[in-house]
Amino acid sequence: MKEIECNYCQAISTNAKYCNLCGFELPMNESNIKYNANTTIESKRNKIKKHHFKLPDFPDSNFLLEVSIWTGRSKLFMDNKQLEQSKEKGKPFLIPKVNGEFLKAFPKQTFPDPIPTLEINGVKINIAEKLKWFQYVLGGIPILLLFFGGVIGAVIGLFATMMNYNVFRQEGTLIAKYLKVFAIIISSLILYFVTITLIQKLIF
């Protein structure tokens, strides 16, 4: 599987002739493929999800939001340049305007979905496509561990739920996605009961 970077908008497309974001024809040269392969390896190592999108107020610009699966921290890029994040309450990203002023984009967590939204001038903008209601329900089954599993159940349940929602947004067939989700659900239950059993043996 090859990931190619678009020279026009810097978006990443997989096994495609034209950019999925701007429609520009993708360069099929070794340097671009190698660059994106290295980027992909780094992203997988750090568990970073990347989301390309546009904003109505900046139709000629391309945005990229990077979200760490482990920490939930996010970085916002505009035309391949990382934007500064203010230290004020809400820690908004500062998007530069033509007149020299800044537009504040507040990252808002959409618990338990790990992909945040951006709130600009009171309007929430979805960065990633919303999942179907039944995908939220199915992927959120591990959260039930919150109600009877204590702290251990809460940690395992939340982590498994976020993994499920990430799986639903990955590329691949629906069958493969649902099989992965079912596997994560079963694995989370097994992990919980094994962990509890080990703790009880250590205590008693």
Image (spheres, rainbow, N blue to C red):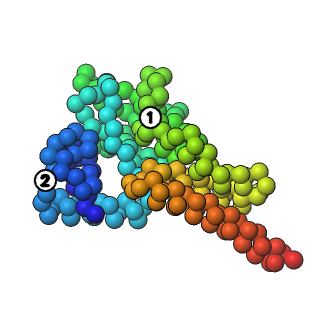
Q: Tag 1: Cα neighbours inside 10 Å, few (<14), some, or many (≥20)?
A: some
Up/down of 89 relative to 14, above or below? above
Q: How many marks?
A: 2
Left or right placement of residue 74 versus residue 28 in this view? right
Q: Identify which amino acid the numbered label 2 is placed on.
A: Pro
Q: Say which residue appears at 78% left-offset and 73% top-offset.
A: 197
Q: From the image, which quarter does the C terminus lie in?
A: bottom right
* Front residue of this view, candidates 187 and 155: 187
Residue name at image x 71 percent, y 59 percent: 153
In this rendering, position of residue 30 left or right of residue 110: left
**Residue depicted at 52% across the width and 61% down the height:** 180
Q: Which quadrant holds residue 193?
A: bottom right
Mark positioned earlier in the residue sequence (2 or 1) = 2
> For residue 48, which quarter of the picture?
bottom left
- Percent position (x, y) of residue 164? 54, 54
**Residue 167 image position (x, y, % from top left):** 48, 55
In this view, the residue farthest toward the right is 204
Q: Would you name the residue on which mark 1 appears? A: 126
User: What's the mark number on residue 27?
Assistant: 2
Q: What's under tag 1, amino acid-wise? A: Asn
Is 169 placed above or below 79 here? below
Residue 23 position within the rendered picture, expressed as x and y whole percent measured from the top left: 20, 40
Q: Is residue 97 among what the camera can see?
A: yes
